[in-house]
Amino acid sequence: MTRRASLAAALAAAWLVVPARAGAVCAPAASGIFPASGIAGTSVVATISGSALDGGVLSVLGDPGLTATLQSSAPATLTVRLDLDAAAVPGERLIFVDTPGGSTGVSFTINAAGGPVVDGVSPALIATQGIPLDVTVTGANLGAVTPASFTVSGAGVSVTSVTPSPDGTMLTLEFTVDAAADLGTHAVTLAVPTGSVVLQVYVRRPPPTITAVHPAAGDVGATPSLTLTGTNLSGAALVITGSGIAVSDAATPDDSTLTATLTIGSGVSPSSEPRLLIVTTESGQTTSEFFVVAPGVPTVTGIEPGAGEPNGTPVAVILHGLHLTGLVGVTTPPGDLTLQNVTPVDDETIRLDVTVAPAAATSTDHVLTVTTAAGSTPATFRVIPTGSPFVGAVRPPFGNRGSTFTIFLQGVNLSLVVPGSGVSVSGDPKVHLSNAAAVDARTVRATMGIDATAAAGFRDVTVQLTNTKTFTKASGFRVNVPGQVPQITDVSPNVVPPGATTAMTVTGSNFAGGAVVVTGPGATVTNTVVDPSGTLITFDLTLVPDAPAENRAVIVVTENGTARCGIASNPSPPTFVPAKLAKTGALFTVAGTGFRLFTFEFSLNELFTPGLRTVAFADADGSLTLSRLQACAVERAFRERTRGFVRVRAVTPTNRIGVSAAQALRR
């Protein structure tokens, strides 16, 4: 019997599908255990990581020889002592954590002396489609590991490079992750002649991006239909900052489009400061700007680029705004600037060429006046020294304490920004800028992290080039103190079936203006409704029929932050094709995919009560041919009767369990 088959056989009488409990809190999710393996005859202290793990009770399923004792409990970690009996059969065990919110499991492997031991993996095994993942594995007895030692469940993920340290205590691994790799959890099995280890890698989509918003402004009292275009938008949630504007009917008809309706209250005041449209997926957040303007009044909300050099060369400029139809003209006082080729594109866009005279004074601002039949509105254009950087806009222009996100600086002559450290802000050091990089000559991106205790208020934003030239945009960014962040106390139900639409209810606080994201592949959220009290959100969750069994998270998003609570999806029952008769040579197969361990159970009745009248046989590949001894065991279980029942249990790479329906069988 193989090690996997041995484990499956031992699980036959013990596997349970834990049902959702009435009034359950968040479902637990275990992302892994480290050490993930150990040597028979030793004891180790291990950490199970995940969420909603506190209050968990441990159980070990598999061959005897592993005892798990809980030492400490917290929502994100459990500390457990594992005692590995010297006589334990080498192979995989499943450690389940049972909490008031449900059950979750991790894999731990017992190896004989000299077998591989994995103590830890850094960074966490979270991969992104299309991007290689490099990790360092620490442990013992790893010197003989090669790429051929690894198998990965699902499609699109493979280990393509392995470099062990000379003493066998460390591995450097490179995972290749296809752009179309299966989303969700993959089981990663390391197998060498001396033993094995099972790990899990989670694959998610790239974070969302926004390239355009139409319209980017709306009238007080209006209900504009909003379209955001970009990438990786499927399943995204949309919220908007500030009060008085409601988001409804958000949908992602394809991966590059997000549509929604904004309802701008009649009491909202026009403002030159934008609201932020916050787009959230499980992979991250991105923002874009939306302006509220006075009805019918022409308004310029942005100029791109907002600067030019005194060299006599025309600069192609785009003016963005609203109510720009009926353009009469764009003018500026005579002298340093010449405006040509003024072209209205639509109600939101005007194109023109701006030429700066060679003798124009630098570091000066000039006003461009846009005039329509309904009135006039200004825009500012700066003349800058040749080759000097300029930043006209920082997007987003503000962010909450305790948040991390990507900012973009838009201007001119930015291609020589100092990589990594070329963007900084004034004030206390609790606003961290890193990973600065030029997107092109007019755009720089950087990662901003705002400490939860950072002082609120405006910061100057400075960009520095490799030629030592700098530009500072005064008060270019503002740190906000967020309002009350959302809190989740319950999600119901917390076990959701694939191939169905389930009405979901989230209970908590501070949900006003919120939206919902559900992580994991194959999930769609529709019909989100926030109760006026801000304490209840309802929505419909649809899982596609082949959605993988996963620990998922329900993420409530508001302008002030996010809150998460776990749910789970169990697999669809395995597609079981039994033989008609229980006799020697009879073939029983599982046609379904997505499982890694199987147990075939034969019983006198449909209850499959453990004991003499139920017998189970394991098979690692889902295909069982009854041997003579197995056929005799089935006959003993059936007693003198001529018929009984058979079913199959199967475990997924995420340690979720599927059970087929019982089927009648003759002998």
Image (cartoon, rainbow, N blue to C red):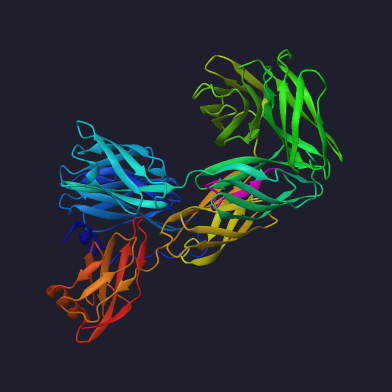
Compared to 207, does 15 lie above or below? below
Q: Quadrant of the N terminus?
A: bottom left
**Percent position (x, y) of residue 209?**
56, 42
94 and 85: which one is in front? Answer: 94
Identity of the residue drawn at 27% across and 41% down:
118
Q: In the figure, is residue 171 to the left or right of 631?
A: right
The part of the image, by quadrant, that contains residue 304 is top right
From the top left corner, tell me how far across and down residue 507 is, in percent: 59, 57
Query: Per the image, is 316 magenta?
Result: no
Q: Is residue 548 visible?
A: yes
* Residue 384 x/y as whole percent: 68, 18
Depicted 216 relative to depicted 361: above or below = below
Residue 199 lies left or right of residue 476; in this view the side is left
Residue beneath the point at 59% across and 48% down: 557
Could you tell me if residue 12 is visible in this image? no
Q: Residue furthest left?
A: 628
Taking the magenta stretch, the answer to whether it contains residue 237 is: yes
Residue 273: percent from the left, percent from the top?
73, 35
Q: Quadrant of the C terminus?
A: bottom left
Apparent side of residue 541 relative to residue 551 in the rendered image (left or right): right
Residue visible at 16% across and 73% down? 630
Q: Nearer the viewer, residue 615 or 237?
A: 237
| Numbered marks: total | 0
Residue 467 vertical position relative to residue 4 in the rendered view, above or below = above
Which quarter of the figure has residue 105? bottom left
- Residue at (67%, 58%) from the top-left corner? 531
Magenta span covers which residues? 231-242
